[in-house]
Image (cartoon, rainbow, N blue to C red):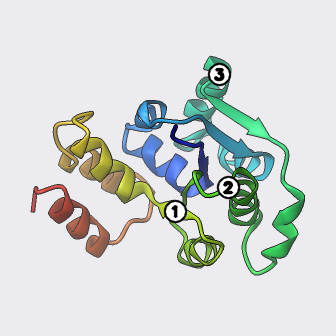
Amino acid sequence: ATGPVAADSSPLIGLAAAGAFDLLQRLPGNVPVTRAVHDEVMAGRHLPGAEELEAAIDAGWVQVVPNPAGADAFVQLGPGEASTIALAVEHGPDCLVLMDEPAGRYHAVEAGLRVTGLAGVLVAAKRAGLIDSVRPLLATLKRSDFRISGEIIRAVLEKAGEA
């Protein structure tokens, strides 16, 4: 069985900004978010992600869970990243971490966790036949305020066979 997907704020906001938040629902496994991540996304009520996250919680496919005690071990990270990694550690190695922030990704890998980010979700969705093309989603994302480098966009297009 596929484990849960512990999601940090950035990929949630990015998927919402790309108009692809529902892709998360189609990933195997449930999607728990920590209270810290929930609060970070909700802090930008008028920004992409807040409405989508609220709807997903109401629909029951995203669960808000308390911040794990183990988050204190990652003092060099923000509360969202630290709590997401600690949550994934509690769930064990079958938990996938959804995180874009490089320092957070480094610590997640160091903790023996599988990590992917917004780009990885888009490529996986295309490979699974959930979307026809990543290009329009990336274009929508680029028009939003979400920061994504041209380098990452090129890499995603290449991995998706759309370069």
Q: Amino acid at mark 1?
A: Arg
Foreground disc of the pair 1, 3 = 1
Q: Contact (CB < 8 A) between labels 3 and 2?
A: no
Secondary structure, mark 1, is strand
Circle 3: residue type:
Gly
Residue at figure coordinates x 32%, y 56% from the top left? 142
Disc number placed over residue 92 in the picture, else none? 2
**Within-10-Å neighbours for mark 2: few <14, some 14–19, many 20+:** some
Q: Amino acid at mark 2?
A: Gly
First of labels 1, 2 by sequence position: 2
User: Is 110 or 150 nearer to us in this picture?
Assistant: 110
Cβ–Cβ under 8 Å for marks 1 and 3: no
Farthest residue to the top: give it: 59
**Quick check: marks 1 and 2 in contact, CB under 8 Å?**
no
| CA neighbours of label 1 inside 10 A, class few (<14), some (14 to 19), many (20+) | some
Q: Which residue is mark 3?
A: 60
**Mark with earlier residue (3, 2):** 3
The quadrant in which residue 29 appears is top right
Q: From mark 1 to mark 2, how far is it between C-alphas?
A: 10 Å
Considering only vertical position in the picture, is 151 above or below 55?
below
Image quarter where the C terminus lies is bottom left
Check the image and name the residue furthest to the front: 1
